[in-house]
Image (cartoon, rainbow, N blue to C red):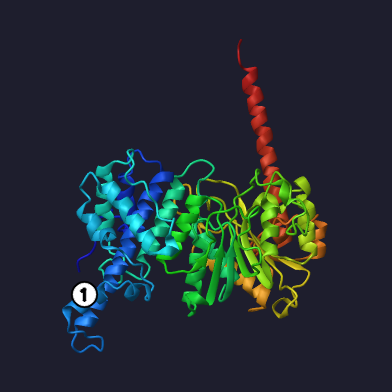
Amino acid sequence: MAGRPRNSTSKPAKTLEQRLWDTADALRGNQEPSEYKHVVLGLVFLKYISDRFEERRQAIETSLSDPDSSDFIPNADRRSRLIEDRDEYTSHNVFWVPAEARWQHIQDRAKLPSIGQDIDAAMDLIEKENPSIRGVLPRNYGREGLDKGRLGQLVDLIGSIGFTGSDDHGSDDVLGRVYEYFLGQFAGKETGKDAGAFYTPRSVVRTLVQMLEPFSGRVYDPCCGSGGMFVQSAEFVKAHGGKRTDISIYGQEFTDTTWKLAKMNLALRGIEADLGDQSADSFTRDLHPDLRADFVIANPPFNVSNWWDAKLTDDPRWKYGTPPQGNANFAWVQHFIYHLSPKGTAGFVLANGSLSSKTGGEGEIRRRLVEADLVDCIVAMPDKLFFNTGIPVSLWFVSKDRHGNGHRKRRGEVLFIDARKLGTMESRRLRVLDDADIARIASTYHAWRNHEGGYEDVAGFAKAASLDEIKHHDFVLTPGRYVGAEEVEADGEPIDEKIERLKKELFAEFDRGRALEQEVRTRLEDVQL
């Protein structure tokens, strides 16, 4: 029987996303990742909506031309008019793409010096015809610093991949996969204060979503980055047999270019969301002041020091204490709680310092949150989960529904999970949580919260602590203080025999030490000066 050659060193085949990224990154030239990501992702968006348009166009043409179809129209001129009727597209949630903006037109001009201006013109046309993305698509492809030869090669690369189900490469979410992969890769290449700010690693988002289980209701993220929390929430609903319309999505983002990325990311997946009419600061210009969400899911920027504004004094959101002006962590926590419905739950990422800090009254705010019975669960996460930051983080879950039926026996308790030993290194710098890791964390939380399967503490991993225990630790919420040490499997040796054996081994080491000391002394005495 034929087998694999013994000296085979073949590596796993690269995924579509990896092949695209490798080529796109090679074409970057002198472009900084912060700028180049908009070049690439804008073209990916343009290719996708053009493919969807052409797919719908072909379906219309086939239906109108088939004598056996109820839509058959024998008149060729009338068929042509209907094929170009924008309502035939928008009524099926397909963007209307004018002729000069369709991918084939761009592809045909890829080798021309004017390709940058042609792409800019296409973006203008698409925005004019589709109000939902007006002011969102990237421009400036015609700028002097962008090499037009490389840009043409990038057009050819993206043109080689089909983003619809009928294409050989296609799947329902192929663009979503490519888009998310590119966002992650760009986050990994960013440097400085904005590194990774627009993208939360997928395994972190999935952990939050699997624990929150947003089956239906209003989902809110006031620091939404490129929209990854919303995408994963919609995928969760879909995976559990629901419809994307089962959840209503509300978001806000401070950075304008990132707000545009979020609008594009959601639009290309057909996810409707209210992200406001522009980017804005959630603290000083709350775009959803009256929203009370069923789920808040967020990864706010860590330890922001320049967030304060004088008009935030006596803000109604600071019910549990005014946050320190030098750190926004507990401003975010209270903003989340303020926007929760009476039965709402929030899951969010915070730097570990927020678990124990007493600076600027943070310890007092944390105490009040615990005493108000709002804190549901704290999960200490492994290191190296985030791009370009080594700051250790934890997941917080706070709930206003802890006194309802689902929490009747959980009043006065906080669940602590120490997940620092989970995850595997995907590269030398980045760790990921796999499905088993996420399932272990989420199932532990659900068993405790919903009394599923009889929750029990696990030494070294999970502990349901009473408010008295937390008070004893001065309201420090670091899971390691509560879960204890992992139990070591018994080796079967009787304790009295083990003690006697260890004493003998220790005394033998003492004897060897004294013998070594005497040997050294003897040799030193023999040394002649």
At 23% from the left edge and 64% from the top edge, which residue is drawn?
3
Q: Residue 244: x and y, percent?
A: 48, 74
Front in this rendered view, residue 470 or 411: 411
Count residues near mark 1 (Cα–Cα under 10 Å), then give few for <14, some for 14-19, many for 20+. few
In the visual, does 208 lie left or right of 181?
A: right
Front in this rendered view, residue 303 or 481: 303
In the visual, does 322 lie left or right of 261?
A: right
Residue most extreme to the top:
529
Q: Residue 10: x and y, percent?
A: 28, 55
In the visual, does 64 lie left or right of 206?
A: left
Local SS, label 1: helix
Q: Do we see residue 455 in this rendering?
A: no
At 66% from the left edge and 24% from the top edge, which residue is drawn?
521
At 67% from the left edge and 52% from the top edge, which residue is drawn?
329
Q: Do we see residue 376 in this rendering?
A: yes
Q: Residue 124: x and y, percent?
A: 35, 55
- State the residue position of label 1: 80
Q: Residue 306: x and y, percent?
A: 65, 43
Front in this rendered view, residue 492 or 174: 174
At 52% from the left edge and 51% from the top edge, which residue is drawn?
386
Front in this rendered view, residue 169 or 318: 318
Q: Quadrant of residue 420?
A: bottom right
Q: Quadrant of residue 91?
A: bottom left
